[in-house]
Image (cartoon, rainbow, N blue to C red):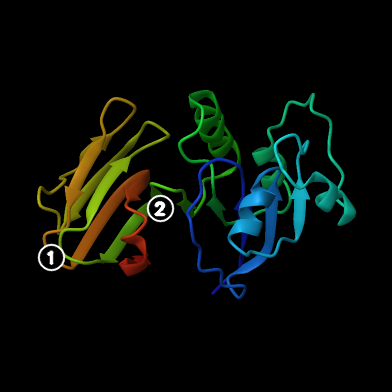
Amino acid sequence: MSMKRLIIIGGRAPEAFSFDASIYSSVIAADSGYDTAKALSIPVSMVVGDLDSTAFRPEIEAMGFKACSHDKDWSDTELALRQGEGAYDLIGGGEGRIDHTLSLFSTFSRMGYPDVWYMRSDTVVTLSGHVDIEAPLGTELSFFSPEGRAHVSSSGLVWELDGFPLSFVSVSLSNRMKGSSLSLDIDGMVMMRLRPEAFPEVRIGRC
């Protein structure tokens, strides 16, 4: 398994996270993402940002990480993503201000989307190409295209998608698995949302 980065940012995050150090080459916290990392007992490799939101600024600075200027063009999340390249998972960023959410998607569009995005009320997985999914009967899934252009065909949903166009005005909401297996063929890139409590039981095979 190739290693990737784990980025932790502010905003509502899962109440628990099963951290596997063998998956990640580094763990980068952005500002109050450090507070989240501490709450989840995740050791960090680096802390970036202006440190205006964290409750642990003296501790962070004692570790040797200094605050950047508050007056900057890059968000703290973008600063974190600029530390390295390639695949990453993301913790945090959920249920915050709408302008922050839109800024996140703007950052993703420019710098790449997370493989898996863990939030308090949502887990979101980025998918493309042919995907096989194993999950319990009735698992609820929604699909959307943050890039505004994708088509999805499925085998294994309660109401199948047959070249379904996903765009800024067309979203597939709250579909369900009718068995334990689902196949998706995706033209473009989509994000699949599911309940966080369901995610540990989901197995995703990408081709």
Q: Quadrant of residue 70?
A: top right
Numbered circle sitting on residue 125: 2
Q: Is residue 33 left or right of residue 45?
A: left
Task: Categorize mark 1 by other alpha carbons within 10 Å: few (<14), some (14-19), many (20+).
Answer: some
| Residue 26 picture quarter | bottom right
**Percent from the top left, x then y, of residue 41?**
62, 65
Crowding at dot 2, Cα within 10 Å, few <14 / some 14-19 / many 20+, comes out as many
133 left or right, relative to 122: left
Secondary-structure class at tag 1: loop
Residue that carries the numbered disc 1 in the rendered image: 179
Quadrant of the snapshot with the C terminus: bottom left
Q: Work out whether mark 2 precedes mark 1 in sequence or the reverse, and give the earlier one.
A: 2
Whole-percent x, y for residue 130 in the image: 31, 59
In percent of width and height, residue 143 lies at 29, 43
Residue 124: image tag: none
Secondary structure of the residue carrying numbered label 2: strand
Q: Residue at x 67, y 53 (%)?
A: 85
Asked if the residue at tag 1 contacts the one at tag 2, i.e. Cβ–Cβ closer than 8 Å, the answer is no
Residue positioned 40% across, 53% down in the render: 125
Where, quadrant-wise, is the N terminus in this rendering?
A: bottom right
The residue under the point 26% across, 54% down is 185
Residue type, mark 2 in image: Val
- Count the numbered circles shown: 2
Say above or below: 9 vs 17.
above
Cα distance between the residues tagged 2 and 1: 20 Å
- In the rendered image, residue 78, in percent from the top left (x then y), is placed at 67, 39
Residue type, numbered disc 1: Gly
Taking 2 as reference, is 11 above or below it? above
